[in-house]
Image (spheres, rainbow, N blue to C red):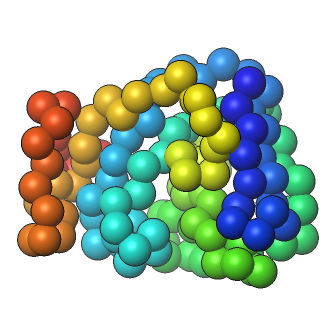
Amino acid sequence: MLRGACLCGSVSVEVTGPIEHQPEACHCRMCRRQSGHVLAAVNVRRDALSVGGEQHVRWFRSSDKVERGFCSECGSTLFWKPTIEGYQLTAVAMGLFDSPTGLHLSKHTFVGDKGDYYEITDGLPQSDSY
């Protein structure tokens, strides 16, 4: 079971079900602006995600298709979720989880948008979209 919290501890997360896919690193402009760099996140079924301190979660609609959650107290990046009706996954920022997670990055997405100040050299698959 994965557990973790934001920087100030106001928001806690617990994954109560299996992780069906390994985390991905998104290099798109919006994720970089939200997180300050790359956003590594893992998709979790919403019915397997328990969030404590939900009153501290604020949502920002960054496009007509996506909302991004952050802690209203410390600003930690928490979540990314599509606004598509019936979509059952929420991406949870990997930085929230206590170690060890037992998870490993599986791929890099939106690498055409990545910052020019770093290179991706880990040999994982890369794509220019999701």
Question: In percent of the image, x 83 and y 42: which residue is there?
Answer: 50
Residue 39, how many percent across, how many down?
Answer: 41, 57
The residue at the far front in this view is 99
Residue 11 spot, x, y in % from top left = 80, 61
Count up the numbered dots: 0
Locate residue 25, reporting x and y percent.
Answer: 34, 47
Tell me, yes or no, if residue 69 can be seen here: no
Q: Is 60 or 115 nearer to us in this picture? A: 115
The quarter of the rendered structure image containing the N terminus is: top right
Reply above or below: 40 against 103: below
Which residue is at 57% across, 75% downward?
A: 61
Q: Nearer the viewer, residue 113 or 119?
A: 119
Q: Is residue 116 left or right of residue 35?
A: left
Q: Against 98, is 68 above or below?
A: below
Which residue is at 29% across, 72% downward? 29
- Image coordinates of residue 119 in percent, x first then y, are 10, 55
Q: Is residue 127 at least partly visible in the picture?
A: yes
Toward which corner of the image does residue 59 lie, by quadrant?
Answer: bottom right
Viewer-side residue, 80 vs 99: 99
Quarter assignment of residue 82: bottom right
